[in-house]
Image (cartoon, rainbow, N blue to C red):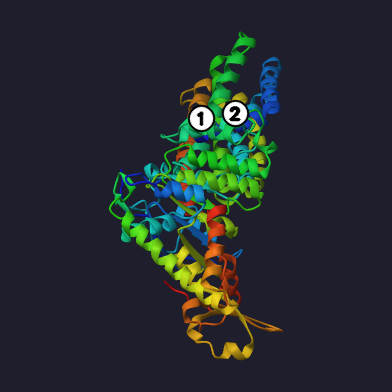
């Protein structure tokens, strides 16, 4: 059993398209942690994930998964330990659960039918229905059941919870928490439903137009940053190094700031992960580095 | 919790409270630094007995600080010591 | 690999039930018709082209981008389609042979019958060899366009084979002599060509598919 220190190590990941480029992405996911991968639509989240998985050929950079280098492609034995959930269920829709179980059993050496059906029953998925008769939420639950029914140590999710109702998302969050009870299990999830990420993530990474603009511990980030709302005059006296994004309104200035650098007496409000993304992206002042 | 009691594991606590594991880890580390618990790798975290005194001292300190604040507010409203004592007695009997 | 074949067979058997029945009917009908022709050719051709149908189902659900995350290699993704085609063609060829022998016993020479079926199977495999690389690497839409071209070729094939069958090959009569053995040689050569082309096609497909973006 591989006791590598990091579940995912990416250095200098690069991919060029005519209209878009992934530009030297560096990130590290320590074993046993959960990382949220945030960015607006088209920022490069899916491109990054597909580059990690080998579905897209990268133009540069190295990716180490669970301690193993994947320059020549991910070894099949390593794929047994990776559970993937994409934003759509890519299983043939004329199949039913029994068919899926049979196929997965043939594909994964470590497939556990009992676990699969346990999750299926827990989600109340109909075994007789074909996938094409499932709702979006049910299809997602099926994808997640598939990812959890073999010996996954790293769960990679690409917008898996988008388009799901809050109740379903809550159930899935429970599942993810269960998954990380094992210290050897890690999760890498891209999402723009930051309310979920605010709960479970240990680290957050922001990506914008193919560039990494932030990769830090979530708690530290949210404690350090805040939203300052004040007048233009007051704002002029603020240390520019404290400001990481700003928005000018008719009534003054709203800025993303580092609390510690703001003089006492000014009210700095809580900044959610959403706020941080919006301010960083909108004013294009990407200076927050770890 | 009593001395020797086992605390829930960091990961279980994170799950039940819906927070991140790093948060619970930090919390346990702080508790250990302050001497309230001891963590043994592989076994878990347990309440430290020898520092119940420390806990008591902590609490006494905080009570004193609150008392100072109460006195200052009382002075501003013109309350005397006897008035304060009456008020406190009410809380004790109703608790 | 097993998983991929299982998936394709299951998907095809659910979606193509009607076709299967049609094919079986065709095969049986062919046994009772005097002129060996479209009834024998069509089922074998169809069976060897099922991989393309399987590919189009894959495309519809974006299977490749998910399949590659499973313990499946790109090589597996390519090979499984070829195995499907070859196995399918073999199966239906043997079935056609059996049906014909059963119902036309006495009316036909097993040797020439086998030759004809082998020839048709080889032609079908050649068709697959040409279409699969294009479908795998550029999508089934382009594959189908290409298929239209090869269909014309294959429609001409029975006519050619018929002529060969009747005219005894056109080989110089002093070599080998009997039209039957001449036919056998020709068909075997054709089958060998088909085999070589299949190997070549697989190599090309694997090479190109390796570089393909699966998303």
Q: Which mark is residue C164?
A: 2
Viewer can see residue B58: yes
Q: Which mark is residue C24?
A: none
Return the residue found at the far front: B82
In-image side of A61 versus A227 (left or right): left
Give whichever of discs 1 and 2 has the lower sequence position: 2
The answer to whether dots 1 and 2 both sit on one chain is: yes
- Classify mark 1: residues with Cα within 10 Å, few (<14), some (14-19) or many (20+): some
Residue drawn at (62%, 31%), measured in percent from left and top? A96
Residue drawn at (49%, 69%), measured in percent from left and top? A223
- Classify mark 2: residues with Cα within 10 Å, few (<14), some (14-19) or many (20+): some
Give the structural element (helix, strand or loop) at label 1. helix
Q: Identify whether C163 is placed above or below A257.
A: above
Tag 1 and tag 2, C-beta contact below 8 Å: yes
Q: Which residue was labeled with disc 1?
A: C186
Q: Quadrant of residue C115?
A: top right
């Amino acid at each position: 059993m591989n006791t590598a220190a990091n579940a995912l190590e990416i250095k200098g990941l690069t991919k060029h398209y005519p209209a878009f480029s992934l530009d030297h992405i560096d990130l590290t996911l320590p074993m046993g942690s959960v990382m949220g991968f945030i960015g607006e639509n088209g920022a490069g989240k899916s491109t990054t994930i597909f580059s990690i998985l080998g579905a897209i050929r990268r133009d540069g950079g190295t990716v180490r998964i669970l301690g193993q280098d994947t320059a020549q492609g991910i070894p099949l034995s390593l794929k047994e330990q990776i559970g993937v959930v994409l934003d759509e269920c890519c299983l043939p829709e004329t199949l039913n659960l029994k068919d899926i179980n049979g196929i997965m059993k043939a594909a994964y050496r470590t497939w556990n039918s009992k676990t699969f059906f346990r999750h299926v029953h827990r989600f109340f998925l109909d075994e007789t229905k074909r996938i094409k008769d499932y709702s979006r939420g049910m299809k997602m639950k099926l994808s997640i059941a598939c990812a959890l029914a073999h010996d996954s140590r790293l769960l990679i999710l690409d917008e898996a919870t988008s388009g799901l109702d809050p109740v379903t998302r809550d159930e899935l969050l429970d599942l993810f928490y269960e998954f990380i009870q094992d210290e050897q299990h890690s999760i890498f999830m891209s999402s723009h439903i930051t309310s979920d990420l605010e709960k479970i993530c240990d680290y957050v990474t922001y990506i914008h137009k193919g560039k990494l603009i932030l990769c830090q511990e979530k708690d530290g980030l949210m404690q350090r940053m805040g939203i300052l709302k004040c007048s233009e005059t007051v704002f002029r006296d603020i240390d520019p190094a404290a400001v990481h994004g700003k928005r000018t309104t008719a009534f003054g200035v709203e800025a993303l700031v580092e609390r510690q650098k703001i003089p006492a007496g000014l009210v700095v409000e809580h900044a959610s992960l959403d706020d941080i993304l919006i301010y960083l992206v909108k004013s294009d002042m990407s200076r927050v580095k770890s | 919790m009593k001395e020797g009691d086992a605390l829930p594991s960091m990961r279980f606590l994170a799950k039940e409270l819906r927070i991140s594991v790093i948060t619970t880890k930090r919390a346990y580390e702080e508790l250990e630094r302050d001497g309230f618990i001891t963590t043994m790798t592989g076994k878990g975290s347990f309440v430290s007995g020898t520092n119940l005194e420390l806990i008591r001292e902590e609490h006494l300190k905080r009570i004193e600080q609150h008392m100072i604040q109460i006195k200052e507010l009382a002075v501003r409203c013109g309350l005397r010591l006897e008035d304060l004592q009456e008020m406190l007695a009410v809380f004790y009997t109703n608790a | 690999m097993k998983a991929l074949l299982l998936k394709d067979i299951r998907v095809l058997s659910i979606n193509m039930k009607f076709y299967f029945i049609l094919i079986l009917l065709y095969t049986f009908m062919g046994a009772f018709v005097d002129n060996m022709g479209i009834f024998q050719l069509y089922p074998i051709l169809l069976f060897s082209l099922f991989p393309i149908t399987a590919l189009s189902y894959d495309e519809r659900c974006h299977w490749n981008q998910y399949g590659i995350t499973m313990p499946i290699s790109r090589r597996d993704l390519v090979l499984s389609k070829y195995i499907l085609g070859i196995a399918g063609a073999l199966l239906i060829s043997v079935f056609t042979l059996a049906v014909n022998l059963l119902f036309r016993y006495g009316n036909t020479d097993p040797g020439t019958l086998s030759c004809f079926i082998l020839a048709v199977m080889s032609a079908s495999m050649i068709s697959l060899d040409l279409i699969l690389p294009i479908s795998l690497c550029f999508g089934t839409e382009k594959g189908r366009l290409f298929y239209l071209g090869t269909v014309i070729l294959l429609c001409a094939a029975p006519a050619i084979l018929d002529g060969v069958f009747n005219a005894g090959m056109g080989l110089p009569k002093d070599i080998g002599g009997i039209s039957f053995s001449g036919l056998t040689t020709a068909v075997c050569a054709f089958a060998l060509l088909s085999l070589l082309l299949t190997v070549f096609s697989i190599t090309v497909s694997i090479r190109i598919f390796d570089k393909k973006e699966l998303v």
